[in-house]
Amino acid sequence: MTSEKTCPKCKGKKIIVGNCECNPEWRSSDGGDQYDDCQCEPDIDCPQCQGKGYIE
Ligand SMILES: [Zn+2]
């Protein structure tokens, strides 16, 4: 028997995917073909299960 259960916050994925925000106003015209109108936060270890994917 185990009391481990899948973490409800990350659903067992162990990480929280960073939010992406997009705003056309961030697009700069001097970046060539590189558009930078979206900014994403980096993925982080799930704070609820400490990156384990389950809750003990
Ligand atoms: Zn988690």
Image: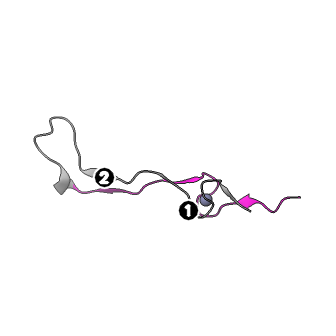
The answer to whether residue 7 is left or right of residue 27 is right
Image coordinates for residue 24, horizontal then vertical, percent: 20, 54
Task: Look at the numbered disc 2 and say if its residue's Cβ is closer than 8 Å to ligand 1.
Answer: no
Mark linked to residue 28 = none
Which residue appears at 40% of the width and 57% of the height?
A: 19
Image coordinates for residue 27, horizontal then vertical, percent: 18, 49
Q: Amino acid at mark 2?
A: Gln
Question: In the displayed image of the protein, which residue is found farthest to the left?
Answer: 30
Q: Which residue is mark 1?
A: 47
Q: Which residues are magenta?
A: 1-23
Colour convention:
one colour
Q: Give the mark, 1 or 2, whose residue is nearer the N terminus.
A: 2
Task: Look at the numbered disc 1 and say if its residue's Cβ is closer than 8 Å to ligand 1.
Answer: yes
Disc 1/disc 2 C-alpha distance (Å): 22 Å
Q: Is residue 36 magenta?
A: no
Which residue appears at 59% of the width and 63% of the height?
A: 9
Which residue appears at 29% of the width and 51% of the height?
A: 38
The answer to whether residue 40 is left or right of residue 35 is right
> Circle 2 sits in a helix, a strand or a loop, which is it?
strand
Q: Amino acid at mark 1?
A: Pro
Crowd around label 2: few <14 · some 14–19 · many ≥20 (10 Å):
few
Which residue appears at 64% of the width and 64% of the height?
A: 8
Q: Is residue 36 above or below residue 32?
A: below
Residue 3 found in image quarter: bottom right
Q: Which residue is mark 2?
A: 39
Q: Quadrant of the C terminus?
A: bottom right
Image coordinates for residue 31, horizontal then vertical, percent: 15, 39
Question: In the displayed image of the protein, which residue is found farthest to the right?
Answer: 1
> Circle 1 sits in a helix, a strand or a loop, which is it?
loop
